[in-house]
Image (cartoon, rainbow, N blue to C red):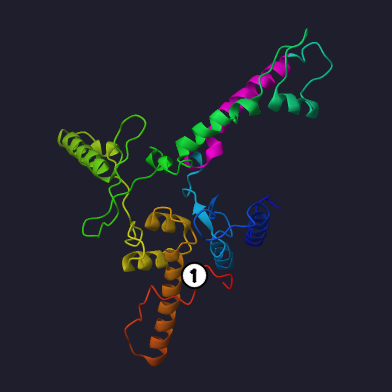
Amino acid sequence: ENGGMNEIMFKNYIIKLTGMLYPDADDVPGKRVVYKVDSGPGRLGLDLLLWLRCRGVYLYPSVPNGTAIGQETDQNFGLFQSLLREARRLLTAELNGTDRKSLNRYDYSILVNGREATDDKVAIRSAFQEAFSTKKNLEAWSIVGAVPATRKCLESIKCRVVAVPEGWRHTRADDVATTQNKTVCNEQGLKQCEAKNHAAVARLNGLGFNGDVFKVSIPRVEDEHRIAVHKRGSDERIRRLAVNLTSHSGRFVVTGGEPLNSDDYFRALEFKDRKAEHEKKAEASEGRSELLWIPEKSRISLGGTREC
């Protein structure tokens, strides 16, 4: 109805696409494939993730709620839309003195592809060729950090930076990021700005003004499980990932944007199942026992065999 893609459609599309484009894909060096996907339906389907992983295909997540900074084509559309508007203005001007009152479908090709100048008509630049040329595509990929995979978009001032409350274990790596205007935008820098703001507000209140109207506070993590843990395979990372299995943003924060079908994902899934089974048995027996925790051993085989 809305032109979207549900879980079944996405699964069938990916499987068909992989078979057509990468029939020899395998989970060995030189034959692995990476798909960059958004947070739509079907991206976390276990059957699809297993099917892809056994064939060396990894789903690479985009920045949650960050289309403007994480999608390559969005970097090209500014120029594309500007050229379209210019082409529309020129074509509309040509309607003066004619019986036509508006543009029609026969003008669509000129709007997108442009035209050369003639004796009675001016030249119109090709919006598509200029906005999506090889040079512009490479520039867009560089801004996003896709090719090469630098993830430069995470340095954007549009990315939300949150602070970790005092007393919580902070295990993420140094996240200092220098933006295009050379402004440091990290947790420590935001805390310093907040302290200065609160001091200025207190000063205004002391002078009899209503300084509270200028008071701002930086966002803080509300859930301890939503703190990045960069050590792969660690118990802490598996436990936090298990809490955020169904949340794209939660998974991205914990892993820093690791592939959706990574080893840690399957181990977190196994841990979540074991924990639920343990709690069910404990409730039935009205007793408590230690949860068996063996993250390295999983009922899901990741050895690359076609059986999975």
Which region of the structure is painted magenta? 69-93
Where is residue 211 shown, x and y percent of the image?
A: 24, 36
The amino acid sitting under disc 1 is Gly
**Secondary structure of residue under mark 1:** loop
Q: Give the quarter of the image for residue 184.
A: top left
| Residue at (77% x, 23% y) in the render | 102
Question: Could you tell me residue 233's position as x and y percent?
Answer: 36, 65
Q: Which of 107 and 55 is in front in this view?
A: 55
286 versus 16 height, above or below: below
In the picture, measured across the screen, residue 208 lies left or right of residue 122, that is left
Residue 88 included in the magenta stretch of the image: yes
Determine which quarter of the picture holds residue 228: bottom left
- Magenta region includes residue 26: no
Question: Between residues 71 and 283, which one lies in front from this camera angle?
Answer: 71
- How many residues crowd mark 1 within 10 Å: few (<14), some (14–19), many (20+)? few
Which quadrant of the rendered structure holds the C terminus?
Answer: bottom right
> Relative to 71, does residue 44 appear above or below in the rendering?
below
Q: Which residue lies furthest to the top in this view?
A: 119
* Residue at image coords 48%, 63%: 246
Viewed as shown, does residue 2 lie left or right of 234?
right
State the residue at coordinates (41%, 67%).
242
Give the x, y percent position of residue 110: 73, 24
Q: Which residue is labeled 1 in the image?
A: 303
